Amino acid sequence: MRTMKRMVRRLLPARVYNALRRAVHTRRLNRVPAIAVNLDSLPRAAEISFPEMLGDDDIAAGYKRARSAIDKVLPDVPGSHSIGREERRAIYGLIRHFQPRSVLEIGTNRGASTLHIAMAMREYRNGNAAPQLITVDLFDVNNPPVAEAKRYCLSTPPYEMLARLNCADLVEFVVASSLNYLVGREAEFDFIFVDHGASADVVYQDIPLVLTALRPGGHLLMNSYFPDGKPLGAGGIALPGAWLAVRRLHREGVGLVALPYPTATGGSSLAILARD
């Protein structure tokens, strides 16, 4: 299936491929019955200010140290599906700013965001009450199938990288689908980062469960959010799932909004979810 997708991607112009992918996601999403959503745990959109949250000089200095250390254990590899530099800086900064005691990450991937979250948590850890990150993926990223290891360029297990950075004790790895992991969890996490780039129907079903697992006053950050379902640059590829799911909820009367993280180049697919 993935081989076929890659072939289609190579043969079709980006504009046509994006339109085709959006149509497929929309068809899948339309098959899902409407879901009730409770937004009480989310902040108001007016309370979110990226410059205020990420403008602290101490956090900026801490990110530089973290980036230097992480680069030694996780070198950039083109085509590895890792999140970009701007996203990594934002994730580190948000964790440092909010200082959550419990964090859930959905979609470990190569571990780039995992490492940045853990390094940020290390800055405010306390020996008696250390913060905890649970990171969930469909496969065991520390002992991955050959095909997945090749696809994500997983040459070093994330747990080993965390150990080298002296923060392995802050992270727990879970192998599960997002839907299966989230069912039945209530108000367990102060911060949730969703980074699985799933289809719109999965994201639409994930959001109510994620919000149930979020503690009041917590924060929900999504990656792979492409405003208006458009690519971030000319000729780029858009993952429409998150945007389509949020748009449907909004059209159904749910006062949910996605606030994209701004960058100098406009090249970020991060967004914080909030209430109108």
Image (spheres, rainbow, N blue to C red):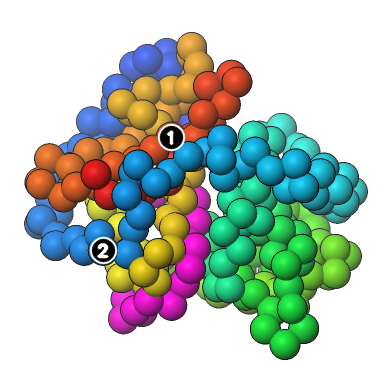
The residue stretch that appears in magenta: 181-198
Of 55 and 224, the residue lying toward us: 55
Farthest residue in the bottom direction? 128
Q: Earlier in the sequence, mark 2 or mark 1?
A: 2
- Image quadrant for the N terminus? top left
Disc 1 packing (10 Å; few <14; some 14–19; many ≥20): many
Name the amino acid, label 1: Pro
The Cα–Cα distance between marks 2 and 1, rounded to whole angstroms, is: 20 Å
The answer to whether 238 appears left or right of 200 in the picture is: right
Q: Where's residue 41, x and y in %?
A: 32, 64
Disc 2 packing (10 Å; few <14; some 14–19; many ≥20): some
- What residue would you read off at disc 1? 260
Name above or below for residue 203 compared with residue 266.
below
- What residue would you read off at disc 2? 40
The answer to whether 117 appears left or right of 223 in the picture is: right
Of 204 and 81, the residue lying toward us: 204
- Work out whether residue 150 can be spotted: no
- Image quadrant for the C terminus? top left
Of 132 and 83, the residue lying toward us: 132
Q: Where's residue 156, x and y in %?
A: 80, 58
Name the amino acid, label 2: Asp
